[in-house]
Amino acid sequence: MPCCITGFTGDDIVHTIPRPEYPRPQFFRNTWMNLNGVWQFEIDHGASGRARGLVEKETLSSVITVPFCPESELSGVGHKDFMAAVWYRRTFTLPEEAAGQRVLLHFGAVDYKCEAWVNGQSVGTHEGGYASFTFEITDALVPGENTLVVCADDNQRSGRQPFGKQSDRYHSHGCSYTRTTGIWQTVWLEWVPQTYISSVKLIPDAQNGTLFVDAAIDGPCAGLSLTASASFAGAAQGSASCLTDGGHARLILRVQDKHLWTAGQPDLYDLTLTLSSGGRPVDTLDSYFALRTISFDGKKCLINGKPVFQRLILDQGFYPDGIYTAPSDEALRRDIELSLAMGFNGARLHQKVFEQRFLYWADHLGYICWGEMPSWGIDPARPHTMSIFLREWLEVVERDFSAPCIVGWCPYNEVWGESNDGLRSLTLQMTYRATKAADPTRPVIDTSGGLHAETDIYDVHDYEQNAEIFSERYQPGAELYDRLGDRQHYDGKAPMFVSEYGGIRWTDDETGWGYGEAPKTREEFIARYKGLTEALLANPEHMGLCYTQLTDVEQEQNGLYTYHREAKFPPEVIRAITAQKAAIEE
């Protein structure tokens, strides 16, 4: 599909589409158009573009390759300074098959506040730099060529928007890195019938071999029915049907043969959802699901009733050439494979909402993940938090609800607070309860490594580098989880989790930083990693661990791989340590 750029001509702007794969792989339609590629582009330093008529302007001052942010090399722009707003413009022509259909404009993510215009008509706004969103543009379309304009406002230093690990200074520093402004995930069009399946929640019951399907229907739905048909490795596994009811269709599908998904065993069922009227298909979605249930037995985390020790790696999802955006779909898969090669069975997806293609690969590789909201940059004690942070967080939970790989949610990271009765604690408690209401099937950590107001798991972050001290600290029965005893109380019963440790710096020179004093030799690194990790594996009360981190990120040089994904140590050596049986698995 060639790029169509109004105001620019010549062979120099003919490109293949970057990131061409379907961006929402768990709910697939074949009626779609990828809008990635070369767009017109302009930086709006004064956020005055609306007043200056950029919506109507036929030619912007530059070009950019979408979906890469303008700070990145892959965008072709590489502008690293703060940008108050950025503008995008391109044209598109829908294929004939879209005639008479409703047309949806999808954005994987835009940082931070987005407004879009089609043929000069505003078609919607969205606030939030990490959640995916959709505008219906049917009424704004004209026959033939259409013009799409997008503006993204990004006032990161306002204190009113989450920004994760994006630097609040001109330069990257500490554990803050290059910023991301504007579009950073795929932009795409989809044409659907007048009544269509707008969203789906899939709730598996591994014990009983069933799947509960809750599909939201958009458009007139009287007299319609929904059919769900499952298969496994090409063999039919059963189907179920129901009538729509008030904009929803809900059914229970029982599979013939029970295959369970767990860490390292990615057994997935194919699923087809068909919306019909009088036996005639109206809309069809292709999907997949897993029979996977998460529960606890005391301090043991169970997947499908069996203890699974969570050997997690901290993954921040940054790339040297794409910043927040992976250069390719293969790069997303490779990051998971790099982690698996060193013995980890999952990851904390840290201070970033990862794109759905990453979750797709995690689902298909049997890789467990904790979903997290980028909470840095926003103070839970400020009154506007609930209206800004929680709204977007619940959009994220809604989007990724059906992903088998997600085994828990963590809205905040390292929030402390002044007292359990303070506004911070109240906000954390409300966020925890809202998350549990949105998804009662998974555990929730209210604030990882910080003050726990209400949580399913008590976790800590500990970057002690002396393995002997670390081992003594995490002996069974240690009181570490009550280290904030004046503000919270650990009852001794909830699951326990050291969700950040290590962070050992290793580089071939003296650049960058890590936690504590760096080892002098590779042998010293391995010995330290072994001592720290085995201390956690040996504690029969621990349900998991999370090592910091998978790769270096810019100046933070404490990855097991370099920023360019080169192994610093033989993966089999790290794997032999990481993959040892944990005491809680005995």
Image: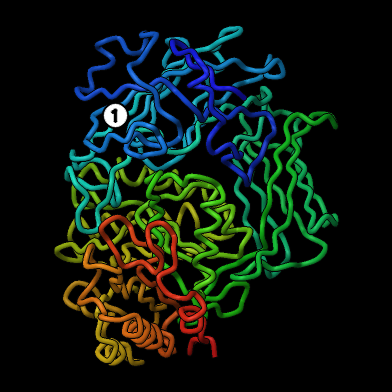
Along the viewing direction, whichever of 577 and 293 lies nearer the viewer: 577
Q: Is residue 7 left or right of residue 331?
A: left
Q: Is residue 515 above or below residue 42?
A: below
Q: Residue furthest left?
A: 418
Three-letter amino acid code of the residue under disc 1 = Asp
Residue 454 position within the rendered picture, expressed as x and y whole percent measured from the top left: 33, 66
Residue 476 position within the rendered picture, expressed as x and y whole percent measured from the top left: 36, 92
Q: Is residue 433 visible?
A: no
Residue placed at 41% from the left, 20% from the top? Answer: 40
Residue placed at 56% from the left, 40% from the top? Answer: 23
Along the viewing direction, whichever of 382 and 429 lies nearer the viewer: 382
Residue placed at 25% from the left, 10% from the top? Answer: 52
Residue 560 position within the rendered picture, expressed as x and y whole percent measured from the top left: 39, 69
Quarter of the figure with residue 102:
top right
Q: Is residue 64 above or below residue 514?
A: above
Q: Quadrant of the N terminus?
A: top right
Which residue in the structure is indicated by mark 1? 153
Quarter of the figure with residue 473:
bottom left
Q: Is residue 157 left or right of residue 554?
A: left
Could you classify mark 1 by the number of other residues whose Cα lies within 10 Å: few (under 14), some (14-19), or many (20 or more)? many
Q: Quadrant of the C terminus?
A: bottom right
